[in-house]
Image (spheres, rainbow, N blue to C red):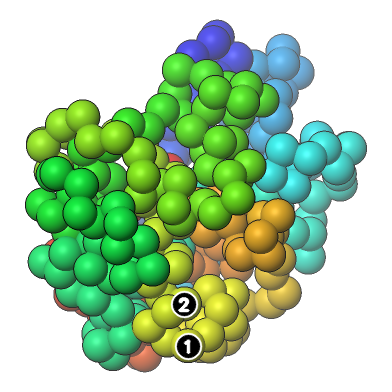
Amino acid sequence: MNKIELDRRQAILGMGAALMMSGTNRADAAGGDIDSLLAPLLRDGKASGLHTLLAARGGRLLVERYWEGEDWNRGIPLGKVAFGPQVLHDLRSVSKSIVGLLYGIALADSKVPPPEAKLYAQFLEYADLAKEPGRDRITVAHALSMTLGSVWDEITFPYSDPRNSEIQMDQAPDRYRFILDCPIVGEPGAKWTYCGGATALLGRLISKGTGRSLVDFARKAMFEPLGLGPIEWTTGRDGEPLAASGLRMRAPDLLRIGEMVQGNGAWQGRQIVPASTFVAQLSPSFS
């Protein structure tokens, strides 16, 4: 992590502290406090790349700030963008969290296999892989928790490097075979390894179980009930939505999802995501 990233994290932590106030007058002053904190950081280039800052408490929007900056569509540069409440933003790995929430919804409707189900049994089209030693111990829970025990590396090499596992997955003729064919190197459940492939498998299970594309199910099950606006979900060369990192969404809509998560899946009195999803920790946390 470089100095700019550290400075940016410190800025966010400082802004979060400014919002930990009590009383209406202090809440009303939150925006001014944030601006005071941000001004020198922006001036000195210590918060570069900050596009949007939204903060809410109890359903009340306290801070709403937008800037200009470089944006991408999953690695493809879009140039300098003037951000605002109607502008879609590249969410990248926050897509993983949303897929986890969607899995919780589908699970409550018995549309996807439970965590204890054998993972390879859900992909009968790859029966040849299921016969390999060790794969019979891998369950859906290991995909949900990114503890598959197989080779996967998105950390050592940048996403511009063809040795990065997510890039290799995207370039493979069959992304799901590529993921399921990765060599087993450890006991499933023993070690967490950041793995976009695990999320891709979850997205595929959602699509198979619901009979809808991941995007259509997301709209019907969560985005429309929350009253969200337009979204884009980038697809790969195979036409499949890139579950791990392809979602683009407006910042206020992402804030609404965050508020729903804070409410254990409830929004304005309606349970959108089953509360059991959070108790069972099926979805990865927002990062």
Q: Residue at x 82, y 37 (%)?
A: 77
Q: Quadrant of residue 205?
A: bottom left
- Give the amino acid at mark 2: Ser
Residue 212 point in image, percent of width and height: 52, 85
The residue indicated by pointer 1 is 211
The label number, if any, that marks residue 207 in the structure image: 2
- Secondary structure beneath dot 2 equals helix
Q: CA distance from mark 2 to mark 1?
A: 6 Å
Q: Are marks 2 and 1 in contact (CB under 8 Å)?
A: yes
The residue shown at (10%, 52%) is: 137
| 66 w.r.t. 282: above or below | above
| Direction from residue 255 to residue 16 in the image, left or right | left
Q: Residues within 10 Å of mark 2 (few under 14, many from 20)?
A: some
The answer to whether residue 64 shows anywhere in this view is no
Q: Position of residue 209 (x, y in %)?
A: 38, 83
Q: In the displayed structure, does residue 33 sit left or right of residue 35? A: left
Q: Tell whether 219 sits left or right of 121.
A: right
